[in-house]
Amino acid sequence: MDDQLASSLGSLKCYWLEPADIMSKTAELKLEGKTYQLPVIEGSEKEQGIDISSLRSQTGHITIDDGYGNTGSCRSAITFIDGEKGILRYRGIPIEELADKSSFVEVAYLLIWGKLPTSEELRKFSELFTENELLHESMKHHFEGFPASAHPMAILSSMINATSCFYPELLSSDVKGHFKLDAVRLISQVRTIAAFAHRKSRGLPIIYPKPEYKYTANFLHMLFSVPYRDYELKPEVVRALDLIFLLHADHEQNCSTSTVRMVASSKANLFASAAAGVCALWGPLHGGANQAVLEMLDEIHQSGDDGSKFINAAKDKNSGKKLMGFGHRVYKNHDPRAKIIKKACDEVLEKLQVDDPLLSIAKKLEEAALKESYFVERKLYPNVDFYSGIIMRALGIPVEMFTVIFAIGRMPGWIANYKEVMEEPTRIYRPRQIYTGPTLNPYIPIKNRL
């Protein structure tokens, strides 16, 4: 412990057992002359965590960890991430295998029920999506209450909550009894709500889903078809968007997923918990990253630059310019999803032959990040947000819908985490704090205040 830290802690001194001793599953904390034994929890991937759940009751102290960066809020069997090695697995299955062999609907089943479905289970699961894709007709009137300028994420969150009003069983205590139907309704109808929100913002007539279309194809149909002509569903386009959904289906305890679990711990219903997740995802530091990529590209284009000047400015820490969609907080060497989606991105751009100056700038930035030593040494590699933003731009999806696409993809992960909370005996989530405000402060009558 360095002198500065020891000084700031005063009489508090902590000593942890050496790594060899940790294998005994106990950590030792010495605090103000007393010694406490804290259990060491080991995950299935040999992750180590010190269980401090009884720390306050034993010592009167709590830990402080701004942003929960070093705090495990739960035990979960859904997704495993190793940021140093660039590993992402859903229920133990590598994301590379799922991207190559699976589909979003199959991955949704895997995440929620913990296993890959049989062909019959997958068929029935898919049929349930078709049976539950329509919104209650009264819901159409709710869309009319939003101004044309309303952000689709605001509409999405509000309408998910409003949808729950049409299913009174959500308020019953028998969560397990109707969970499967609730989950199917939410995953199926979130795309219908999203498409309707987009149409509303553009003053376009609502397009209803078609039962003969599969999940992702149906979303594209509702998004882009017109009453007199159906949108042409190119297999490469459908596959690319399905891949975006699949790659975003879950990502461990991020901001929005943790929000869903926290709301669920109060025994709120599935729709209310998911709506809270949408609100958390809406933040530009979370779900808005792929939107920020396109805004950066547009800024470069509007300045008359082909990307060269911006690349040089990004190397200058005093320029204020930052590459959006490069590097990742969790993945320290590479984002495993980026390599997968880059291939799909290249295929879509080649197939569609899109002539777009922003995409040309994007390719220039990508080339620089992958080759120039400045970016390589700092691990500023293109991440999944960079490529997903480019794909969605090529597909004609408006920028304000990018985070909505993210929310549709993340829905199975949120539902799986909600299910874990409901199945495990748990208290309502209630973080502690270190109070830093005034000490005892008397009330001053208004006539005596300065």
Image (cartoon, rainbow, N blue to C red):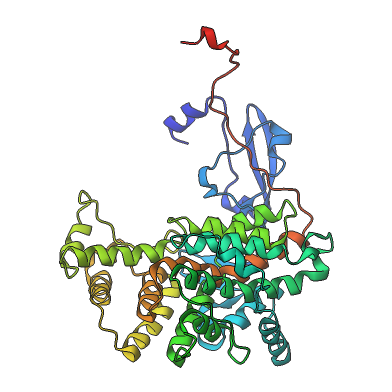
- Residue 393 percent coordinates (x, y): 36, 75
**Residue 103 picture quarter:** bottom right
What residue is shown at x 20% (from left), y 65% (from top)?
A: 302
The answer to whether 345 appears left or right of 426 in the picture is left
- Residue 278 percent coordinates (x, y): 56, 60
What residue is shown at x 69% (from left), y 79% (from top)?
A: 132
**Residue 92 picture quarter:** bottom right
Camera sees residue 46: no
- Residue 408 percent coordinates (x, y): 55, 71
In this view, the residue in front, 86 or 207, is 207
What residue is shown at x 69% (from left), y 32% (from top)?
A: 59
**Residue 358 picture quarter:** bottom left
In this view, the residue in front, 367 or 228, is 228
Farthest residue toward the top?
Answer: 448
Where is 329 relative to 116, above or below? above
Camera sees residue 19: yes
In this view, the residue in front, 350 or 205, is 205
